[in-house]
Image (spheres, grey):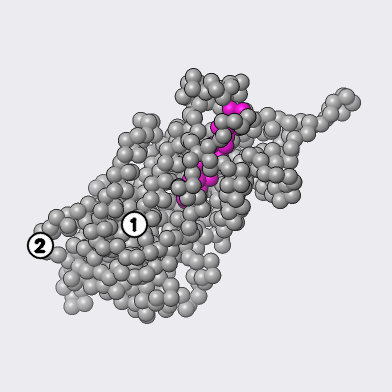
C-alpha cells in the first residue's frame, strides 16, 4: 500500500495527465476513497479502527494508481510496477457480489484503458464487452428519470461513464475490425455538464445551471462527438457493397462537412493548430489528443482515394475536374498522416512520448502505413514524395516507425504491426528504386541519386526480403501485389474485403483467402491466428 503522499502524487498524475478525454471519475470522490484505503491503525491508539472501503471502490483506486504509474516517465517511475495494483483490482472485480453499480462501470472502464496502455488489446476487448452489458443493464445510455433520486455527482458521473465507454467503443471497433456495440438510435443520454469537480461536491443537482462552466470536460465531450462522426464515416465510406466513385466522393464530402463543423465548434484552446503542444498541462494534453483524432479522421475519410479507379497516375494531360477533386482528397490524406507523424516527433524531441500513450501509438502506426501505401502507388511523381517543408515522407515515416517500435513489447499487436510495416517499408523503397529506371533502362521520374535522397542514410533491407520476395504470388510492377495497371492509371478496387462493416476498396493481395487491406492496417497488424514469421507468409500474402 502506498503512503498518503505517494497516493496523492499518483492521483495527481492520473487526473492531470493520464486522462485528457476519458474523465469518467469524480476526482474528490476518488481522493476520498484513496484516503480511506491508505489509512492504517495507529498502534498507540487502541480506539482507532481501520477504515473500511467497499471492494469495488478499492478496485477503482487500485486501477487509478496502476494507470498513473504507466503514464510516468522512466525517471519518475524507476522500478515501480503497476501490475500488483492491477491484479488486486482484478481479484476484487471478478468476485464482486450483488447488483451492478456505477463504481463497477467506472472501475471496469479504468481497467480497459489500463489494458490498452499495457498493449493487451484482446483482453481489453473482452472485458469491455462485459462492461457494456453492465452499462446497458443499468440504463446509462438513457436519460436519468426525473423521478429518480440521485445526487449531482452520481448524475454527472453516469453521463461521463457512458460517453467515455461510447468513445472507446468506436475506437475499439476500428482497431479490432468488429461491429460497434452501442447503436446511436438506442441512445438519448445527455452529454455531461462541463463544471469543475469541486463545484459539484456541495451543490444540489437542481442548481447545476448556475454553476460556472469551467471544468475539464470540453475535450471529453468533443471527443465523443468526433467518435460519432467516425461511426458515420465507417458506415458510409466502408459498406459491404462496392461504392461507385460518385458515391464515394459524395459521402466523403458529407463526412468532411461534419468534420469541419465539429472543428469550428471547438473552443479555441482545443482547435488543431500547426503547433504541437507537448507539455504536461492538461489543456496541452487535450489539444494533442484532439489534434491526433482529427488527423486520424481525415485519413479515414480520404485514404480510399489513394487507390481509387480515378487515379491520375501516369496521365500527361491536365486532369479534369474529377481528377482535381481526386487529388484534393489524396493531398488531404497525406497531409493528415504527416501531421500525425510530425506531432509524434515533437513528443520525442521534448521527451514526452510515454509508453502508456496507446492512442498516440495506434494513430501513428495508421499514419505510417498510409504514407507507405501512398509512396508505393505514387512513385512516378517524385515531387509528391516530399512534404511542403522539404522532408522526405519515406524518411519521416521510417523515423517515426523506429520510435514506436522501441515502445512495443515483444509479442504485442503493436510489435506485429511493425513487422508488417517493415514489409511495406521495403516495398515502398523498392517502388522508388523501380521508378528511377524502367525495365529498358529509360529514366522514369527521377534518378537513383534522387531516390537515395528520399531515404534515410542508414536504411537497410532485411536479408529475407530478396529480389524474389515480391515476385512470388504478386505483380511486382503494380505496387503491393495489386491487380492494376499503372500504365493506364487505373486500378481494380472492387474486391470484397473482410473488416468492420465491410470494405469495398483496398490493396488486395493476389491470394483472395486473406487480403491485406486498410482493414488489416487498422486492426493493429495481423490477424491473431496469423504467423507473420513463417516462410509461407511471404508466398501467400505478398
Q: Residue furthest left?
A: 317
The magenta stretch is: 150-171
Where 257 sits versus 426, above or below? Answer: above
Residue position for label 1: 237
Mark 1 or 2, nearer chain start: 1
Is label 2 in a helix, a strand or a loop? loop
Residue 203 within the magenta-colored segment of the rendering: no
Q: From the viewer's perspective, is 358 left or right of 485?
A: right
Residue 323 vertical placement versus 147 (above, below): below
Query: Can residue 160 be seen here?
Result: no
At which x and y percent is residue 443? Answer: 17, 69
Q: Which residue is mark 2?
A: 317
Place residue 283 in its image quadrant. top left
Question: Which quarter shows the C terminus?
Answer: bottom left
Distance from the alpha carbon under mark 1 to that under mark 2 = 30 Å
- Label 2 crowd (10 A; few <14 / some 14-19 / many >=20): few
Quadrant containing the N terminus is top right
Amino acid at each position: 500500500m502506498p503512503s498518503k503522499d505517494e497516493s496523492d502524487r499518483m492521483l495527481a498524475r492520473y487526473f492531470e495527465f493520464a486522462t485528457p478525454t476519458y474523465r469518467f471519475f469524480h476526482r474528490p470522490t476518488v481522493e476520498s476513497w484513496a484516503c480511506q484505503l491508505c489509512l492504517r491503525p495507529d498502534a498507540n491508539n487502541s480506539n482507532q479502527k481501520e477504515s473500511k472501503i467497499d471492494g469495488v471502490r478499492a478496485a477503482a483506486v487500485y486501477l487509478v494508481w496502476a494507470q498513473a504509474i504507466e503514464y510516468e516517465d522512466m525517471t519518475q517511475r524507476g522500478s515501480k510496477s503497476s501490475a500488483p495494483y492491477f491484479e488486486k483490482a482484478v481479484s476484487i472485480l471478478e468476485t464482486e457480489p450483488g447488483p451492478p453499480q456505477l463504481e463497477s462501470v467506472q472501475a471496469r472502464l479504468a481497467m480497459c484503458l489500463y489494458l490498452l496502455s499495457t498493449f493487451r488489446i484482446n483482453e481489453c476487448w473482452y472485458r469491455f464487452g462485459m462492461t457494456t452489458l453492465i452499462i446497458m443493464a443499468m440504463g446509462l445510455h438513457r436519460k436519468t428519470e426525473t423521478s429518480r433520486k440521485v445526487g449531482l455527482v452520481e448524475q454527472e458521473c453516469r453521463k461521463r461513464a457512458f460517453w467515455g465507454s461510447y468513445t472507446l467503443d468506436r475506437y475499439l471497433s476500428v482497431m479490432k475490425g468488429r461491429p460497434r456495440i452501442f447503436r446511436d438510435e438506442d441512445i438519448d443520454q445527455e452529454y455531461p455538464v462541463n463544471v469543475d469537480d469541486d463545484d459539484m461536491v456541495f451543490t444540489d443537482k437542481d442548481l447545476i445551471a448556475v454553476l460556472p462552466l469551467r471544468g475539464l470536460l470540453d475535450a471529453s465531450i468533443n471527443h465523443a462527438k468526433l467518435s460519432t462522426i467516425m461511426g458515420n464515416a465507417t458506415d458510409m465510406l466502408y459498406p459491404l457493397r462496392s461504392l461507385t466513385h460518385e458515391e464515394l466522393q459524395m459521402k466523403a464530402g458529407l463526412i468532411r462537412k461534419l468534420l469541419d463543423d465539429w472543428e469550428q465548434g471547438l473552443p479555441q484552446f482545443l482547435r488543431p493548430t500547426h503547433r504541437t503542444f507537448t507539455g504536461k498541462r492538461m489543456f496541452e494534453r487535450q489539444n494533442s489528443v484532439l489534434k491526433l483524432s482529427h488527423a486520424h479522421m481525415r485519413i479515414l475519410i480520404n485514404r480510399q482515394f489513394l487507390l481509387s479507379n480515378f487515379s491520375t497516375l501516369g496521365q500527361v494531360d491536365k486532369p479534369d475536374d474529377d481528377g482535381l477533386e481526386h487529388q484534393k482528397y489524396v493531398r488531404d490524406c497525406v497531409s493528415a498522416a504527416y501531421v500525425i507523424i510530425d506531432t509524434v516527433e515533437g513528443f520525442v524531441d521534448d521527451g514526452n512520448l510515454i509508453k502508456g500513450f496507446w492512442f498516440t501509438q495506434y494513430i501513428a502506426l495508421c499514419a505510417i502505413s498510409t504514407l507507405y501505401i501512398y509512396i508505393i502507388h505514387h512513385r512516378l511523381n517524385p515531387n509528391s514524395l516530399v512534404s511542403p517543408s522539404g522532408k522526405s515522407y519515406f524518411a519521416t515515416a521510417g523515423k517515426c516507425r523506429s520510435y514506436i517500435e522501441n515502445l512495443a513489447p515483444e509479442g504485442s499487436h503493436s510489435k506485429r504491426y511493425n513487422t508488417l510495416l517493415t514489409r511495406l517499408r521495403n516495398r515502398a523503397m523498392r517502388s522508388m528504386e523501380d521508378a528511377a529506371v524502367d525495365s529498358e533502362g529509360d529514366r522514369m521520374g527521377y534518378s537513383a541519386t534522387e531516390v537515395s535522397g528520399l531515404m534515410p542514410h542508414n536504411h537497410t533491407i532485411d536479408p529475407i526480403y530478396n529480389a524474389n520476395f515480391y515476385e512470388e504470388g504478386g505483380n511486382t510492377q503494380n505496387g503491393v501485389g495489386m491487380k492494376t495497371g499503372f500504365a493506364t492509371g487505373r486500378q481494380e478496387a472492387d474486391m470484397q474485403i473482410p473488416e468492420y462493416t465491410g470494405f469495398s476498396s483496398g490493396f488486395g493481395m493476389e491470394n483472395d483467402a486473406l487480403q491485406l487491406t486498410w482493414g488489416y492496417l487498422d486492426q493493429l497488424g495481423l490477424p491473431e491466428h496469423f504467423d507473420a514469421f513463417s516462410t509461407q507468409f511471404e508466398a501467400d500474402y505478398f
